[in-house]
Amino acid sequence: MPMSIGNQILVLIKKEMVLEWRSKYAIGGIMLYVFSTVFIMYNGFIQIEPHVWNVLFWIVALFISVNALTKSFVSENTQRQLYYYTIAHPLAVIFSKIIYNCILLLILNILCFLVFGLIMGNPVKESGLFFMALTLGSCGLAITFTFISAIANKANNSATLIAILGFPLIIPILVSLIKISASALRLMTDTSVTTDIWTLLIIDVLLLAMTYLLFPFLWRD
Amino acid sequence: MKKSILLVCALLSTHLLSAQESTQSVMESSGKIFVVLATVLVIYAGFMIFLTVIDRRISNLERQIKD
Amino acid sequence: MKKNWWKILAALLLLYTILAGFLIPLKSGIEYVNKDNVNSGADFEVRAYCYNTHFSEVDEIRAWLKIDSSHIIKAKEVKAVGNLMADISFSLPQFLPNNKSHVATLIIDNKKDGYAILPSAIQINQIAFDTILPEENFEYVSSLDNELITINSLSFPYRNILYETIRNLFFHVPLWFGMLIIFLVSMIYSILYLRNKNEIYDMKANAFTQVGILFGILGLVTGAVWARWTWGAWWSFDVKQNMSAIAMLIYIAYSVLRASFDDVEQRSRVSAVYNIFAFSTLIPLLFVIPRLYDSLHPGNGGNPGFGGEDLDDTMRMVFYPSIIAWTLIGVWVAQLTYRYLILKNKLIYNRNNKNRHKN
């Protein structure tokens, strides 16, 4: 019996979670990465200025997303993809992955924030704004890297390609994120924060729309 | 033919480099007109290099057709 | 010949751009003055250093100090010192308008060069007086609207710091417009490829991307040359410079992506998808993000755009054709590239067919 796309998405998200649960070492590895990075930075800087904190946080977040999301398509072998191809709608496949990756990345970024706060102190003054940036940023990173992972999966040396294709595309998101969180840290008095948030939201929606339009072409072989 | 184009390119690029490396005074003289000249020469060199690359590729193709 | 009319148009427009861009002279301008501070109630003489003026060839030079829109002081005497310098003497009133200090604008004109303006040229300080002169009845000129001499011959506006490099508007800026149009065309071919699966569209998209990268790199290099002699550094980490460099990275990544496939059909399909995705991220990169930041480029962060006074009618007359010229040249080069690609593809196809027959 064919399922609606919504149901397919739910089932696929559930499947992703089960797979993640089975291979807990992946998330554990990322947390280990965060801990060691923050520890090295703390040893290096000792006294960390808020604006340095801001930039470092987003760089670590960027590398978390690279580590966590590259596997979303690459780790799956061809047979399993063929299996999905026969049973699921392509949009269900990509959107389940995007939604799952958004949630995963948000959780990882919050954990990363906690580690940062624990070791290097918490300079965030406006938590609401900061978490807004965190949510929108996680979504943007998740959408871009999931799509790039899907593209790179078709090519030969995927791991390198993800960095080459993804990093330039992610810079607009990262730039506006650093600016929004700089206002959340009250590093700059800026009256145009709402414009920045709208910009970020529009970029996210644009990326999502392009994914929606383009993924079906990528998926069929 | 190809060599002569390359030679012209090389001459132009050295000319361009020397124009940039020379002192402030040359570039700032005559109302900075040499900056415009340098800009035009950069574009010229860029197009010449691109055309040379295409030219070489087409020569390769011709050789393949002959074989 | 009929089919190639646009190539002739491209060549002619480019010739026009180069000739007009180099031959039309600049308007005259005032570079700087040797005094920046004077006191009210005094007479003073100031030397103005001008650009592109011909003072020794004219009989009369006039000059004014504009304090505000309705208070303008006419110079008592203007003496030419060579072609490019003028000694101007003014006598100032004891009390300035509203009884406070002002920053005045200097205006000079003559019959040959027209008028030239130096905004915020001299600060006039209002000083306190022990004795007030009995008859303070200073004569201001109230308006210069019909007074100034304008010359009607073709000329580009004079801007301090820029000088002649304002002509770069016809060589640097069209590269960016051309690049955007060429990337747009490339994206359209990618869409056509995804719809029709015709290999030729993919080759066209590839060729246009290559030319777009050429335009982008030339834009960056020419921008760096221009910036070195106006802003003072090759690379100022200006937001538009950075974003353009990132745009180049995105499209160089496109070339890398193409190189990493063995299967032709898959390469065409995936790179078409990436090309469309890349162009859609180019829009926030080049149009939205730069608006959020201060920029040295005109038109960003409160800087006046190249519009209004900077882009006057004479500039427009050369600027718009220059955009068309450079874009058509780009299309021409792209056409050469994809014609090569199509030929190469045919050759490979024929060779494979021959081999098959042999077997």
Image (tube, helix red, strand yellow):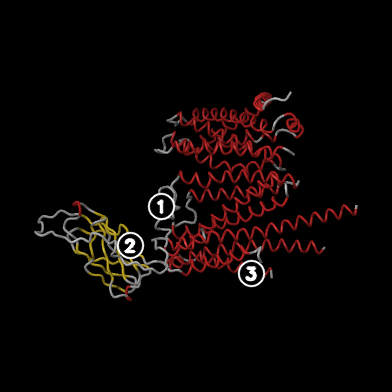
Mark carried by residue C304: 1
**Amino acid residing under circle 2:** Ile
Q: Which residue is mark 2?
A: C117
Q: Residues within 10 Å of mark 1 (few under 14, many from 20)?
A: few
Query: What crowding class fits label 2: few (fewer than 14 Cα within 10 Å), some (14-19), or many (20 or more)?
Result: many
Q: Which residue is under mark 3?
A: B7
State the image quarter where residue B29 is shown: bottom left
Task: Tell me if A82 is positioned left or right of A141 in this view.
Answer: right
- Mark closest to the chain's N terminus, 1 or 2: 2
Label 3 or label 1, whichever lies nearer to me, is 1
Amino acid identity at mark 1? Pro
Labels 1 and 2 touching (C-beta < 8 A): no
* A1 vs C83: above or below: above
Looking at the image, residue C298 sits to the left or right of residue A106; the answer is left
Query: Could you say where residue C84 lies in the image, as x and y percent from the top left?
Result: 34, 71
| Residue at (28, 73) in percent of width and height | C60
Q: Nearer the viewer, residue B37 or C16?
A: C16
Q: In the image, what residue type sits under mark 3? A: Leu
Which secondary structure, mark 2? Answer: strand
Q: Is residue C86 above or below residue B64?
A: below
Is residue A119 toward the left or the right of residue C359 in the image?
A: left
Host chain of mark 1: C
Q: Is residue A55 visible?
A: no
Q: Nearer the viewer, residue C303 or A220?
A: A220
Q: Chain of mark 2?
A: C
How far apart are the alpha carbons under marks 3 and 1? 43 Å
Vertically, is B28 above or below A150? below
> Which residue is situated farthest in the front direction here?
C2
Q: CA distance from mark 1 to mark 2?
A: 18 Å
* Residue C104, above or below C77: above
Are discs 3 and 2 located on one and the same chain? Answer: no
